Image (tube, grey):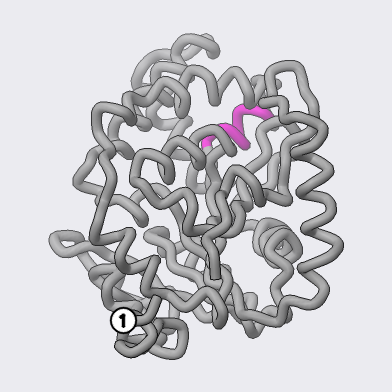
Amino acid sequence: MKPVSLLRLCPSLPPIARRAPRFPNTFVRRIAMASTNSVAVDSRPVFFFDIDNCLYSRKCNIHDLMQELIDKFFIAHLPISAQDAVMLHQKYYKEYGLAIEGLTKHHKIDPLEFNKEVDDALPLDDILKPDPKLRKLLEDMDKSKVKMWLLTNAYVNHAKRVVKLLGVEDLFEGVTYCDYGSQPLICKPNQKMYEKAEQDAGAPSTEQCYFVDDSALNCEHSQARGWTTVHLVEPGFALPEVPPSKYTVRSLEELRGLFPQFFKSNDEKSTS
């Protein structure tokens, strides 16, 4: 199956907003046609991939850079000290899964302004490079047997930046993201986010959903929904005392052994 560009197939487009990305009308019509014509007859299971600290290593320290930018945002936009900013940041993250959700609920902060000063400000071009090993893993997945989909709490801008820099943007059929241009914000681990992902990707059923994420909390809630979930914990990081999901891996490469039904055989690889 010919790879479909992420930029061409993305059902969860943001609404036309003050600073939200704008897409050509022809692009929007093309997405609408794809959603109505193909999803209804597509019976493939869906494999959802988290993006940050999942498609690339935590050792890239992007997470730490993001935390610093979030703390700076709290200090700049709220009348609090640096110490209180860190504490409030962590409080909102634990309560909502995203710091920005707490900011919008309690402080009327514009999520798109937050995205501009945090995610969009990350120096990703200096950190992320094309990853041949990741690309080979994803290319070896049989697209006739499984649909590959991105599921992230980031905004669509960040999602597109990351997969483009990693050189894998053409290997996913779409992305479900936290829409900062719409209120209220919906993100993992909220069950509504997993429901939205199923609808976006046209999943045949909840039982036909597979998911890999580095967040134990996200894994726990997707597993509770009925998804087959894989918790990614890189070497050098402690395993949780209680596994949040059925499977735990140290590398995405282990997906080959866990789900051989979704990967091409050696004969298929040689002819593709």
- What is the quadrant of the C terminus in the image? bottom left
Horizontal and vertical percent for residue 53?
34, 51
Task: Choose between 98 and 271: the one closer to the eye.
Answer: 271
Q: Do we see residue 84 in this rendering?
A: no
Q: Which residue is mark 1?
A: 270
Depicted 178 relative to depicted 122: above or below:
below
Question: Residue placed at 35% from the left, 54% from the top?
Answer: 55
Q: Quadrant of the N terminus?
A: bottom right
Tell me which corner region of the image, top left, top right, bottom left or bottom right, holds residue 254: bottom left
Q: Tell me the element at label 1.
A: helix
**Residue, x 79% and y 40% (percent of image)?**
28
Instruction: Tell me if residue 135 comes above or below residue 105 in the rendering.
Output: below
- Residue type indicated by callout 1: Ser
The span shown in magenta is: 99-104
Image coordinates for residue 256, horizontal then vertical, percent: 33, 81
Q: What residue lies at 67% left-to-right and 61% top-to-bottom?
A: 197
- Residue at figure coordinates x 66%, y 51% from the top left: 9
40 to the left or right of 179: right
Q: Residue 154: say if magenta.
A: no
User: In the rendering, at what x and y percent does residue 74 appear?
Assistant: 48, 19
Is residue 215 visible in the rendered structure shown here? yes
- In the displayed orientation, state which residue is furthest to the left: 236
- Tally the numbered discs: 1
Question: In this view of the protein, which residue sits in the foreground, 48 or 111?
Answer: 48
Residue sitting farthest toward the front:
271
> Does 42 appear above or below 175?
below
Q: Position of residue 209 (x, y in %)?
A: 60, 76
